[in-house]
Amino acid sequence: MAAPMSLLVEFGGGAELLFDGVKKHQVTLPCQPEPWDIRNLLKWIKQNLLKERPELFIQGDTVRPGILVLINDADWELMGELDYKLQDQDNVVFISTLHGG
Amino acid sequence: MCQAQEEYGGCDQPRRRPRVSCAQKCMKCKEASPVLVIRVGDAFCKACFREYFVHKFRAMLGKNRAIYPGEKVLLALSGGPASSSMLRQVQEGLSRETAKKLRFMPGIIYVDEGAVCGQSLAEREKTLLQLETVLQASGFPYHLAHLEEVFDLPSSILQRVPHHPAGPKDNYKEAVEGFIRQQRQEEGGGPSVPERQIQEKLAKVSVRDAPGMEGLAAPEARLLAAVRTEQLIRLFGSVKTLTAKEELLQTLRNHLILHTARAHGYSKVMMGDSCTRLAVKLLTNLSLGRGASLAMDTGFSDDRHGDVVVVRPMREYSAKEIAFYNHLFGVPTVFTPALDTKALEKASIHRVIERFLYGLQAEFPSTVSTVYRTGEKLSVTPGDAGPAAEPERCLLCLCTLDTNVEDGSALQAILVSERLSQQKLPAAAPAGRGCCLGAEEQRGCCMNTTAPGADARADFLPLLCYGCRLTIKDTTCLESLPLYVRSEAERRKRRAAMKLEIQEFLLEDEAVTPGES
Amino acid sequence: MPAPCSACGASPAALRRPKTGHALCRACFLAAFEEETHQAIVAGRLFRPGETVAIGASGGKDSTVLAHLLQLLDQRHSYGLHLLLLSVDEGIAGYRDASLAAVRRHQRRSGLPLHVVSYRQLYGWSMDRIARHLGPRNNCTFCGVFRRQALDRGALLMGADKIATGHNADDVAETVLMNFLRGDVGRLRRGVGTGPAGGEGAVPRCKPLRHAYEKEIVLYAYFQGLDYFSTECVYAPQAYRGYARALLKELEAVRPSAVADLGHSGERLSLRSDLRMPARGTCQRCGYVASQPLCKACVLLEGLDRGLPKLGIGKHRRLRDKLRDGEPLTQEERRRLGAPAEGEPPEEQEPRGELGTDEEPWGRRELRGPQDLDF
């Protein structure tokens, strides 16, 4: 059972446009039976934060190609990508490198 | 027919993406823990990444020896990640100790395209304010231009200005050494030449260029600006496809930047195209029929304008590296919506290519660099072009015309198809496409073959390269194009007609002479 | 009621041409399509009077339309050609059997002579058997390399002066994209080669339909009631080329002229003059054109015959050198080259058909390259 945890989720490079232009989101993830990882964080973001055009942010169970993910200022490729187990107070940043957002 | 045609059998399939490995050390210092993975599997720590990034910029400029000491260089800043990162690299370079110092004189241009990218006046003001903060903080002289200003450009912008550089490339070293010597002599505690000049520049308040607006009272200027915005929106409104709009915007933006560079004596323009963006551009331009000018459009240096050379020093950085650098080292960026922001994924050729490349890159991590490297193998000069005669250039993009019809070529086949798909007699109604319908206020429909506008179109197309022809074919009303384009087209047309006349005259003359003797 | 045809102005239009945007009626479209093919043949100087032309006939839409058109235009414009159908049987059950049946039907209707060469007869391996060794990936590499030679060898056997293939504008555009995606610099220009010298094999190749859109070829076949076989190859879905194909379809949806535009781009690319291009020699074993001591087909075959099917795929130069020098490979190295794990039953031998005997004068071991033939 994962305890509720608090995260700082940020969007940049134009990705913020899909979130009402808000770049920083202080969020609290609720309790759930399995531990929180990036995979289910993305689902949660889709349900709770995304305002429009979800396909421009999420494709399949991962981020749209061209969107970078940083976990605590490090490349998510070094952290296990979708399988990274989130910790309380983690900072997750999504930066779009796509043209024009 | 089978998909694996015989030509492709011999090549290896690209590698798929390897599994991610966690918890390794920085591949450079072998000590610190890494913060990002670049290329395929190289993990760098923050400090080594920074060194690598900064070094690469200097190395790129050093390798190409394109920028001479004391030269005025205009940085094209869009507010986006790559150009913002480029600005930071120039700042880094100028603040270095003497040995590694960059020695040119930078200025910055920002082009406000808000009018065609769906921004309201208030939003544009807000963006400009944000940008001005960045521009002022840079300490460099800067120029704020609005896309509306294209309506006041001189037609000379479409003419190549032959330029003889200070010396051949071999003299680069001499030039640098001479410059350093001169600097040492002058060094009496005072600032060096470029620094002093930069300070002089800075002493003046930054220049806001608005050709045609000087000497106007504020309300009049505002009125003129509103008229220009109106004109610009009408122009882009007459372009039927997002693909052609993108191309037109790029063309006009380049003209405006070139004009600013010429007006202020900049001999180089730095563009922030990253490796990722260039890969997208390569495939996009390939799909837009611009194969002939790929090397010019994506190479390190682009001298199509003659006197002002465009250079692309960010071309070896991937979008990922740039995004990480900006994030880790606090490079400010300003997001401005583009023409295609939030547009459908399949709205334009540019969009389709970008999505495709990013998607393939996620699966095969060498995709972008392979495309980029392939582009590097291309030549600027067409294979059979003789060096003697100055080639004819496209009215809009100034690339060498690629529209000579060769036997058996794709272009010839297209012309044959067009001819065979139209009625033999020109008397009947125009082919299929009624343009300008519902735009009655625009006088002179240009698609209609019976209207006078049709002649304009027929006169116009031969002046363009294959790619620009496609853009103009998607533009319904040529009258909306800025005057400088139309008047230069007129000038070229007259010149061609005169040349023809003279030729006929000469031929006649020749024909007559033998009979008389 | 659709708009009137833009060519005759009378009949209602039946289609919009992707290449030009014009709406044409059925009759005008058929006439235009035929005339364009004729113009392409004339402008490209693809044939000379009296030539024997082997039409690469797969039974698919492109080659069926090509064979139909060449026969029609040869009569209409008196090219004076001897036309033949040449089919390659890769040995793909359920795919090639059915498409070869379509070729045979065409042969009966057209009266053109048909010749079939099979992989099994030329190389000793059918594609089905290769696929059993290789698994689902890379089959198209084998098939493509083998077919290139198979057409050449078939054409030589038939005494053809030229091979005409059904490559269309979409194929050309895909190739242009593919060459960039795979960094295939050497093929950047060759892939769209125009004239008779465009091929890289022994017999000159030409592509009379290379400016014709796939869509129009399909429509032409449909309007003419041509009988062709239309199923994807069972091995094709794994090919990397599928990505370029999908991309091209999307580009065409955005801007229908994109297919032709890519063709134009491909023709106008110019390579830097300081690039080193691989020198073209001949294969030491079979005499075919090759840039290495052995041609690709012989390397692939060597791998198959040694039970190391991946020998010719990917970058195994070091292992190839080891084999050449007679050094033994480790178990791991053998595994990397696709050798079956120990304990697996050996591959069954394929029954040889009446054509596949080694005694055939043009069996692969015996066949020397074109240099040795008085041609």
Image (cartoon, coloured by chain):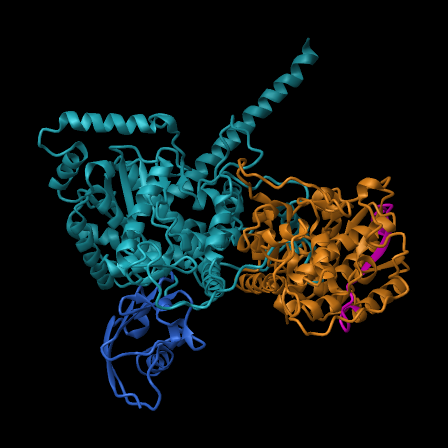
Chain colours: A blue, B cyan, C orange
Task: Provide residue C286's location: percent of width, then percent of height.
Answer: 78, 48
Task: Provide residue C334's location: percent of width, then percent of height.
Answer: 63, 62
Give me the residue at 80% from left, 69% from top: C349
Q: Quadrant of the C terminus of chain C?
A: top right
Residue B329 is drawn in which quadrant?
bottom left
Give me the residue at 79% from left, 58% from top: C123
- Going by the picture, which residue comes out furthest to the left? B189
Residue A11 within the magenta-colored segment of the rendering: no
Residue C339 is drawn in which quadrant?
bottom right
Extent of the magenta region: C74-96
Residue C92 within the magenta-colored segment of the rendering: yes
Residue B77, visible in the rendered structure: no
Give me the residue at 39% from left, 29% from top: B162
Task: Provide residue C5's location: percent of width, then percent of height.
Answer: 67, 61
Instruction: Say left or right for C331 vs B64.
Output: right
Q: Is A46 placed above or below B12 here?
A: below
